[in-house]
Image: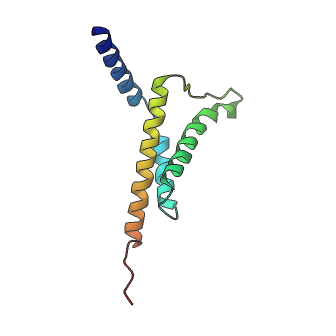
């Protein structure tokens, strides 16, 4: 029984370290831009996926500008999967929040007058 608890504690420490090491800045910037410039606040899951792909591809392909090999994230590690999932959730929330703020401040939520 002690081995199970050691495994769970080790898994929790690993997830904590993985989420602490995630770089959220590209997702925040791209998510805010998409949230502010989107015409409608629907299809948030697809927009979050596009945000995540851009935020992963730009740093991965950046070394190719200097003639080096691209640096792809290693999806075989559980920590990388946890980081990608967390960044997806952040992108989804940011796009939804800024889309809602945009519609509130632009007056898009006004009710139509009854005829």
- What is the quadrant of residue 98 in the picture? bottom left
Q: Residue at x 55, y 27 (%)?
A: 75
Judging depth in this view, the residue of 10 and 104 nearest the camera is 10
Colour scheme in use: rainbow
- Name the residue: 42% across, 43% down: 90
Quick one: 106 or 75, which is closer to the camera? 75
Q: Position of residue 62 (x, y in %)?
A: 63, 35
On the image, the x and y values in percent for residue 97 come to: 39, 55
Above-or-below relation of 76 to 65: above
Q: What residue is shown at x 56% (from left), y 25% (from top)?
A: 74
Residue positioned most to the bottom: 115
- Residue 89, compared with residue 61, is above or below; it is below
Q: Is residue 31 above or below residue 114?
A: above
Q: Name the image quarter holding the C terminus.
A: bottom left
**Seen in the image, is 108 located left or right of residue 40?**
left
Indicate left or right for 61 with 9 as reference: right
Where's the N terminus, which quadrant?
Answer: top left
Q: Position of residue 88 (x, y in %)?
A: 47, 41
């Amino acid at each position: 029984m002690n081995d199970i608890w050691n495994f769970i504690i080790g898994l929790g420490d690993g997830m904590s370290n993985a989420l602490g090491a995630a770089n959220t800045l590209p997702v925040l910037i791209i998510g805010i831009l998409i949230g502010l410039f989107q015409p409608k606040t629907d299809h948030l899951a697809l927009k979050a996926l596009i945000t995540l792909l851009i935020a992963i591809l730009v740093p991965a392909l950046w070394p190719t500008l200097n003639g080096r090999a691209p640096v792809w994230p290693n999806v075989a590690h559980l920590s990388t999967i946890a980081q990608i999932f967390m960044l997806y959730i952040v992108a989804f929330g940011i796009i939804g929040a800024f889309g809602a703020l945009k519609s509130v401040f632009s007056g898009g939520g006004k009710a139509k007058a009854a005829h």
